[in-house]
Amino acid sequence: MLKRLWYVFVIITFSLMANGQKADFKAAEKYRDENLSHKYGDLSVNANWIEGSDIFWYSYKTSTGKNYYYVNASAKTKKLMFDSKYMAAELRKLISHPYNDLDLPIKDIKFQNKSTTKFTFKVDSLNFLFDISTQKLKRVGRAGEKTKQSWATYSPDSTMIAYCKDNNLFLMKANDKDSTEIQMTNDGECYHNYAYNEEDTCTDKKIRASVVWFKDSKKFYVERTDERKVKDLYVINVLAQPRPKLEKYKYTMPGDEFVPQPELIIFDVASQKRIDIDISKWKDQTINVAWTSQKKADKLIFIRKDRLLKNLDVCLVNAETGELSVLFSEESSPYFNNEYSGLSVLNEGNDLIWWSERSGWGQLYLYDGKGRLKNQITNGYFVTGRIEQIDTIGRLVYFEAFGREPWVHPYYSMKYKASIDMGEMTLLTKEHANHSFNMSKSAKYFVDTYSTVDQIPESVLRDNDGNIILRLETADLSQLFKCGWKMPQTIMVKAKDGVTDLYGVMYKPFNFDSTKKYPVISYVYPGPQTESVQYSFTVSGGKNVALAQLGFIVVNFGHRGGSPKRNNYYHTYGYNDLRDYPLADDKYGIEQLADRYNFIDIERVGIYGHSGGGFMSTAAILSYPDFYKVAVSSSGNHDNNIYNQWWSETHNGVVETDNVKTERGAAMDNLRMKRGSGITFKGEVEKNQDIARNLKGYLLLVTGDIDNNVHPGNTLRVVDALIKANKRFDFLMLPGERHSYGDDTPYFDRVMWYYFAQHLLEDYRTNVDLLEFGQN
């Protein structure tokens, strides 16, 4: 009888084990990013243009070694800057030290002024000079002998140094050891000083000042911020020695009464005169200096925005008198696109190129120096991205754009040029791929590396019409392919509205079997400033390639409200709904993929993300508890009411209220608006702890304990709500880690693998040493 029961027990045990899948931890470890990095070389060409020429150099590493190349664009020639074996031998002769000719440790290559053949470089602590034309190498001294001090901000002519000390601004003459300090200010104090880094405050040491020089070195300006009333935030570094240490820093949150107050000050070096610019208009406004005059220090242009980020002024300042005038104003709803919005100033302020979403799609507009609209440079139902370069002589602007060509993926950066005055637009890069851009100062040539997630990177030299005149490099992936690595797959699904296309990437196990069923994991980041989908070639896909090798299908696609590369409607979709807006699209997208591919098991769905993705993944499992079975959420801003002011007020909105009652008419109203009397701002964002009671599946929350970006309180408030709701969950705090996990990243990765393996594959191995993952 006992023997029969034993057989029954064995059969049941093996039956249960058969229903679970074994996670392939060994494969996941093999294909971690850091374990793949030595299996491929460079993926792009970084062209270093030699000043005043159409010649550039670059280094490029393949499986056969690293070489340095010298390219003459006008002559359409490419050659070695030097033979690596020869260079290694010459170095050995000079300093009696052997070097690997396949990977020379050369750094800081700099061509000498007005020379296209002579350059200096550094090996270890030594400087060398090499002449390409004669192939002669000589040692020129130790590096660092004339290193400029980190606290010193030199004038363009290198005659003066500006710095901050005791919260105030000082000047001294450069290259003069006995130079007398010139104290330019005496009104600096803690959190209202002249330091470049807001963390550098209340110190009597010399530190870098928040100084920007005019090109003629006669004046400089300072953007100073008053943070004295901004409230403090704290974290505790428990690993500090000899005892845990409290860290305090200024941090503004949405709806805060006291936020940083900007100031703009211009200083004259010779007279030591100071001009405080009256920039006031809106309460709690922000400013950003966009341009200073180049020929003489007589004017600058800055952009002023209200706290709602719906209104802005482009302002001109007379640097001699301090007089301010508004060149033009703009209103944008629901807020200004901070990723691409910008101003380019040409011809000493006589031409202004402005990026605007006034049509719903980001386009370029030309204004004159008095703020009058002259013409629209680009026009159409596509998004113009960043300006790459401006040819002021040829009156051409070079820029990227997204979604203009119907045959091209709308997230690929395609390069164009257009006439500043006529607006005629020409496509320069015709390949269906994501393109880079590195142009010579003459604007005659540019280097372009183009690729997709499933296309090997190609680097080429083009003329300014986009014609390829020289093929430079193709990335060497031979060792990568030999180890079993494979390309991911691009995907497209519909958003929940049934009409909006969403784009992404699918990662499969490299031993993929289409007859099997695999759990699916969605890697998410909600935006709205970007979507964390890889569109250029990627070896690791972040954490996605390694995660897929455990035995998962990992998908990563965008959502409405995600990227400003689409139109204004798309990237502002989440306004006033900062928690929930991407969730339905993610769920619906996964459902479509499961309908399309039989190998996806819709009953086993996981989700993970970091930062905004940590926020989103937790919101997803709490909002759709019957759909998402497992979530791993790291460093999530789960409660945006205690995240930073800019993020939450911009993307969720903030309400402005005037609490002062008056019957003195419009004049008093305008005065009150200018001074900000009675104006308050309130912003409330939906938070994850409010729906903690919905948890049904498995949730792992992770945070670093000294995260001073997304405060650990964001995660701990969700922990508290889950405890009060009597929910079972998992929580990991990483001691000594901030927002990114640094040395603890491998540990976190393995914990995430283990968590998904347990709860999606039912692989409940009992090993506790995570390094044993490789011992399948």
Image (cartoon, rainbow, N blue to C red):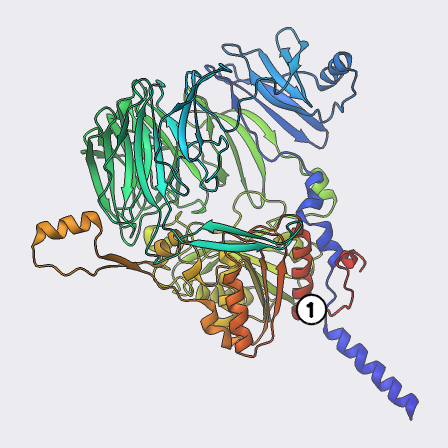
Residue 509 visible in rendering? no
Q: Quick check: 161 above or below 165?
A: above
Q: Residue most toward the top?
A: 134
Q: Nearer the viewer, residue 520 or 341?
A: 341
Q: Residue at x 13, y 53 (%)?
A: 669
Q: Quadrant of residue 628 in the image?
A: bottom right
- For mark 1, give the secondary structure: helix
Q: Position of residue 726 (x, y in %)?
A: 56, 79
Q: Quick check: 385 above or below 532?
A: above
Q: Nearer the viewer, residue 569 or 504?
A: 569
* Total marks placed: 1
Q: Quadrant of residue 20 in the image?
A: bottom right
Q: Position of residue 652 (x, y in %)?
A: 36, 59
Q: Nearer the viewer, residue 327 or 521?
A: 327
Q: Left of 298 or right of it: where is 626?
A: right
Q: Residue most toward the bottom?
A: 1
Q: Quadrant of the C terminus?
A: bottom right
Q: Quick check: 97 above or below 527?
A: above
Q: Residue at x 34, y 20 (%)?
A: 269
Residue 758 visible in rendering? yes
Q: Position of residue 113 (x, y in %)?
A: 51, 11
Q: Position of residue 773 (x, y in %)?
A: 76, 58
Q: Left of 623 or right of it: where is 664?
A: left
Q: Amino acid at mark 1?
A: Gln
Q: Left of 527 or right of it: where is 56?
A: right
Q: Quadrant of the N terminus?
A: bottom right
Q: Which residue is mark 1?
A: 758
Q: Quick check: 532 above or below 42?
A: below
